[in-house]
Image (cartoon, coloured by chain):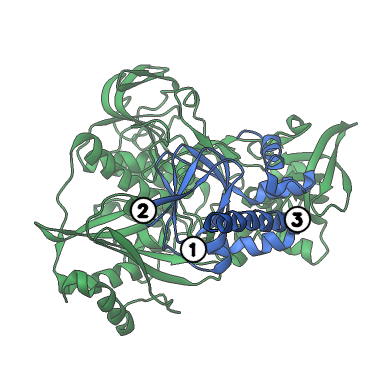
Amino acid sequence: MSAERLGGDERPFPPGEYPVVIVGSGPGGLQLSYSLMRLGIEHAVISSDESAGGMFRRWPFFQRLLSWTKPYVQFERTTREFERYDWNSLLADEPQHRGLMTEIMDGTSNYPSRPEMERSLARFAERTGVRVRFGCTWLETRRDGERFVLVTSDGEYRCAVPVFAVGVAQPWRPSMQGIELAAHYADTRPANTYAGRRIFIIGKENSAFELATGFLPWARQLVLASPTPTKLSITTNSLVGVRARYVQPYEDHVIGGGGVILLNASIESIERNGDCYRVRTKRSDGSGELVFDADDVIAATGFTAPVRDLAALGVATVGRNRLPAQTALWESASVPSLYFAGTIHQASPGLRKHGMPSNSGGVNGHRYNGRILARHIARHHFGVDPERATLRAPDVIPFLLRELTNGPELWHQKAYLARILRFDAGRGIVDDGVWPLMHFLDSGSGDAIAATVEENAAGDIYPCLYVRRGGDVHEVLLPPNPLLDYRTADNERLLAEALGPLLSL
Amino acid sequence: MATQEEVVDTLASLSIFADLTRPELEHIAHELDEQYFPQDQRVLRQGLSGSAFYIVLEGEAAAIASGERVNTLARGDFFGEISVLLGEPPTADVIAVRPLRCLVLAGERLEPFLVEHPRVAFRILQAEARKLRNATRRKS
C-alpha cells in the first residue's frame, strides 16, 4: 500500500483519549484535520475506508464530477484568488499545496473525473501531512460525563469534541408501496447492461438526470417521475436544479422525441409484473393515473448521512433525508460540543436569502466551512485564537471592495459566509476573517461590518454589507456589475457614505 | 418528520392545506423545505431583505417588535407572509422560544405558489382576516 493511500504513517491514532476526534476521510474530514493542525489542535482522524477520498472513491456513478476546475484563468494556481475558479482542491495556507487538482486533471474536461478527484484528495493528505487511521470503523457513541466515547472496531476513543465528517452517501429511499423492489442509484449497473430496456427513474434531480444522460445511448424508454416539475440551474439562477451538463434528457423530452418522458406525478406503487415491473403513478395536476411497465426501476432519491446512533444521543434531524440539524457553526442544534464537517453542512442552511441555498453540499462550499470550524473549535473549546491583523481606516473601503470582487469564500458561499471587520476599542479595526453571516448577525453587539456577495431569484449578483453600530444592524446593498467587478468609484462613494460614521472618515 | 407519508399527513392536518387532495399535498411536500431552529435562534430578522414564508410544524416562536413580544406562534401558524407579499423587509424578529420545526417557502416562490393553489390562498386570506378582526376588537 503506497504512502499516498495511507496519508502518512501506517495506522496512526490508536484508541485512547484525544481532544478532538474526526470521523471520516473524505474532503470534509481532511480539510478540518489540516486546518486544526495549522492551529496546533491535537486530534485523531479515523475512517472505515482504506484510503482517502470519501464518496469520491465510488461516485459519481458515471465517473465525472459536476464541479469544475479551470487551470488557465487570470490568477496563478498558487493564489487564494484562484480558488474561485477551482471548485475541487482543498484549501492550504502554503502556496505549494494549493490548486492541487490542476496538477492531476488530464485536460479532456474542466470537470475532473472521479479518479482524478480521489487522487487529488489523497495527494492533499500526503503533501500536507494529514494522517488518518484507516480501517477503523466507528460503531457506537455514548456520553461519559462531559466527554464523548466513540466505540470503534479498533477500540474506544474518548474526546471533548467529536466531529462527524461521514458524508451524505448512504442510499435513501422515500417510503412508498413497493419501493424495496427498486434499485437505488448506488446499485446502478454498467450502462450497457440496460441496452434495449425500459427504465423508470424515480426522481428528477441531478442524480436522476446523470443516470438518464448515461442511459441515453442504451435505453429503449426512459421515464423520470416525481411530484414537482424539473428545475434547471440555468433558470433558477443558482445551483438549485439540474446542472447544464445533464440537460440533454430534458431537451429530448421537451422536443417530444427520443423516448424520454418527464412526468410530474407521485408514485403510488411498484409491483412485480412477470419479468418486469408495473409502476402506478398519479399525476400532480389531478388529471389521473398513468401506469408504466418497466424492465428496471431505479430510485434516484438521494442520500442520507450514516449517523448511526447519534439520534439516540439526542441529535435532532431535519428534512426528507433526515440530516443532523446544525447551528450556524455546524454544531448539533440539540447536542452541544458535537459537530459535523463536510457535505453534511448542507443541513445548516444559513439565511437562505431569496431562497438561495448555500454551496455547503459541495467541496467548493464546505471546504471553507471546515476552515472556519477549525478556528471555532480552537477558540471556543481550547482557547486558541491567533491574533488577527488590523487595518487602517483609509484602507477599509478598498479592502472590502477587493474582497467582494475576488474573495473566493464570498463567491462560493454567497450570503452564507462573510468577511468580518470588528471595531475593537484597544486594537482598532480588526480583520476578523471569514465567518458565517448568520453567526455574525446572531452573536455579538460590538460595532462591526460583514461583507458578502448575494444573489436574488432574478439572477442579479451584488455585494451586500451588514453594518452593526450601537447594537443595530442595517443592510447596505451595492448595485450589480455586469463584469462582476465592484471596485468602482460609485461603490467607493456609496461605502464612504454608509461606513463614514464608523470609520470617522 | 420521517417519511414522505408522514410529511403529507402532517400537511393534511394543517388548516391552510385542509382543502387539498393527496396528490396536491405530495406536490407541496416536495416544494417546501423543512428547517429546524434550536431554542433562542432567530428565524425572521427585522429589517433584512430576502426573507421567506414559514409554517410552524412543531414548537413555539415569538414575534418581537421594538423589544416587545407581539405574538406567539405555534403549530399550524404561519409568518413572514406580510413582508413577502409587500416586498418589504420584516418589521419584527421571530425567535424560537422552544425548539422549532418549520416548513419554508422562499419569498420569491410565494406568489406562484398561491396562484397555483388558490384554496391555500383563500385559507391564508381567512387567517389574515381573523387577525385583522382581532386587532380591531382589541383597539375598540
**Towards the viewer: A447 or A78:** A447
Disc sitting over residue A480 in the figure: none
Task: Between label 3 and label 2, give the one nearer the viewer.
Answer: 2
- Residue at 77%, 48% in the rendered image: B20
Q: Residues within 10 Å of mark 3 (few under 14, many from 20)?
A: some
Label 2 lies in what chain? B
Under circle 3, the secondary element is: helix
The total of numbered circles placed on residues is 3
- Residue at 18%, 71% in the rendered image: A503
Sequence order check: which comes first, mark 3 or mark 2?
2
In the image, residue B111 sits, relative to residue A171, either above or below, namely below
Label 1 lies in what chain? B
Q: In the rendered view of the protein, which quadrant contains the N terminus of chain A?
A: top left
Q: Amino acid at mark 1?
A: Gly
Q: CA distance from mark 3 to mark 1?
A: 25 Å
Chain represented in green: A
Percent x, y of residue B63: 46, 50
* B114 horizontally vs B52: left or right: right
Q: CA distance from mark 3 to mark 2?
A: 35 Å
**Towards the viewer: A51 or B10:** B10
Chain represented in blue: B
Q: Amino acid at mark 2?
A: Gly
Task: Between label 3 and label 1, give the one nearer the viewer.
Answer: 3
Which residue is identified by label 1?
Answer: B50
Q: In the rendered view of the protein, which quadrant contains the C terminus of chain A?
A: bottom left
Spot the residue most to the right.
A274
Task: Between label 2 and label 1, give the one nearer the viewer.
Answer: 2
Which residue is identified by label 3?
Answer: B119
Sequence order check: which comes first, mark 2 or mark 1?
1
In the image, residue A269 sits, relative to residue A104, either above or below, namely above
Label 3 lies in what chain? B
